[in-house]
Amino acid sequence: MSRVHCIILNWRTAEMTLDATRAAMRAMEGIDGAITIVDNDSQDGSFERMQAEAADWPGVRVLQSGRNGGYGAGNNFGIRAGLPGGADYVYILNSDAFPAPDAIRALLDYLETHPDVGLAGSHIHGLDGAPHTTAFRFPSIASEFEGAACTGIFSRLLKNSIVAPPLPTSTTRVDWLAGASVMIRQSVLDQTGLFDETFFLYFEETDLCRRAAVAGWPTVYVVESRVAHVGSVSTGMKEWKRVPRYWFASRRHYFIKNHGRAYAALATLAHWAGLGVFRLKALLQGKKPHTPPYFFRDFVSYSLTSRSKPES
């Protein structure tokens, strides 16, 4: 029987993490495996709170990572901790995500019956049932321009490059999935490596799925696996007044790592050009910017100040 290691990363959301763990425990019934909660050095009492609550929960342990190295580093800590006797699959679940009772089983069954697939992710929806866009294409120069321009004519011309196309209505292969609920073969991680810890937050799932795809392991969006998701609870993305530097750093690292510095520079120029198109359209139509305040200025500033820094 295949074994599943479920990892839930916590950062200052102890109560919600415990709720997600309860949902995961129900969804893991009948599946051989265990759940690891990793506290990413919250320093707010989260670790102690979760340890006390989960002390008597069968198949659940709470670990302290000792540092907040970001999403990838925290999940890697849990993956490296492993399970006694090992695991065949790693299941990553966000601390604000709540799998339906059959959601984890649906991912496991799909991977068991499709040995050529490396990663499988769930259909993610809000607490109101509205679907969340979590199935994507890999970013490119064209997608950087289209996404920034946000203008009908260019979106139609570049429709095959849009990073977030219409959400699939049936189980299908995609380039990459948001990491709210994703199951990964341990053998794929052994072959391609864990999350790249250079990414503090954002683009780490994109990079992992791309490395898997290059190695011949596709990613599949499994609509039968349904997971409710609050979204942006730990990151605070919905309340961003300015885009944090780590978003720009992650974006830059992704393009340089996977496509080289020249491509990364062209992708940045394409994004700037797209922003210029949108600003002109907004000026003519009296619309508000679709980016947070100071986005363009911060983007240019980061790009110029980071040009001379070596890429790790």
Image (cartoon, rainbow, N blue to C red):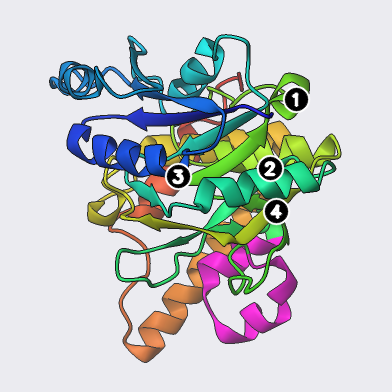
Query: Mark 3 or mark 2, which is nearer the start of the sequence?
Result: 3
Query: Between tags 2 and 3, which lies in front?
Result: 3
Q: Is residue 258 magenta?
A: no
Q: Residues within 10 Å of mark 3 (few under 14, many from 20)?
A: some
Residue 27 in the image: above or below residue 66: below
- What is the secondary structure assignment of the residue under circle 2? strand
Instruction: Kindly identify the amino acid type of the residue bearing the numbered disc 3.
Output: Ala
In the rendered structure, which segment of residues is drawn in magenta?
142-162
Kindly indicate whether the residue at mark 4 contacts the one at mark 2 (C-beta within 8 angstroms): yes
State whether residue 170 appears in this view. yes
Instruction: Kindly identify the amino acid type of the residue bearing the numbered disc 1.
Output: Ser
Identify the mark at residue 187; answer none if there is no mark. 1
Which sits in the foreground, 245 or 44?
44
- The percent position of residue 149, horizontal first and vertical second, equals 53, 72
Query: Between tags 4 and 3, which lies in front?
Result: 3
Main SS class of the magenta portion in the image: helix
| Residue matched to label 3 | 27
